[in-house]
Amino acid sequence: MTSVFVRPSSTPRGGPLLTAAIALASAFASTFAQAAEVRVFTLQSIPLIGVSPEVAVVHLDAASQIESRIGTQLPADPAHAQAIARERLSRGGATMQRELAAAYQGVADAWSLGITTLPAVVVDRRYVVYGEPDVAKASARIAAYRRAHR
């Protein structure tokens, strides 16, 4: 059985007027039901199901796979290996650098969110379901939790 975990949010400062304004704005925003940001943190080796097109899937092993492509079949001589790796990086150019930066950003995001188990389905950077590979099912659990705890 999976559980929904909620990250604590900071308490608004500014007194009751600000709190009332925030509550009113929240109610108004929920009326228009903006789409929730859904991100799944996982590994390539963990198959996911129920992933809709708007869900961002972050493969935490993407950086090591890119680095493996760069470092595959390098010679034993360090200077020669370094030259070949640089050439592969330059051939991949800006695209490979963007892929590598995005891969490491995903790792940093998972760390900053305190992700402890994979897969992790995260909604609005606040709600998370661990260990559920069915993204639609995990998202539905979070939606039910949110409705029950308004």
Image: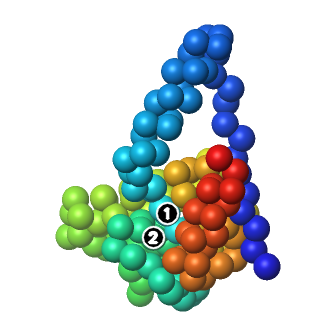
Q: From the image, which quarter does the N terminus lie in?
A: bottom right
Measuring from the top left, give residue 49's x and y in whole percent: 50, 86
Which residue sits at x=60%, y=82%?
Answer: 133
Whether label 2 touches label 1, CB < 8 Å = yes
Mark linked to residue 39:
1
Measuring from the top left, give residue 74's x and y in whole percent: 41, 81
Q: Residues within 10 Å of mark 1 (few under 14, many from 20)?
A: many
Which residue sits at x=45%, y=56%?
Answer: 37
Q: Which residue is mark 2?
A: 57
Residue type, mark 1 in image = Arg
Q: State the residue in front, 12 or 147.
A: 147
Q: Secondary structure at mark 2?
A: strand
The answer to whether one can see residue 63 in this image is no
Measuring from the top left, give residue 136's x and y in whole percent: 52, 77
The answer to whether one can see residue 11 in this image is yes
Residue type, mark 2 in image = Val
Of the image marks 2 and 1, the number of the one nearer the N terminus: 1
Location of residue 89 (image quadrant): bottom left
Left or right side of 116 for 80: left
Left or right side of 98 for 52: right
Real-space Cα separation, disc 2 to disc 1, in angstroms: 6 Å
Which residue sits at x=68%, y=26%?
Answer: 11
Left or right side of 106 for 91: left
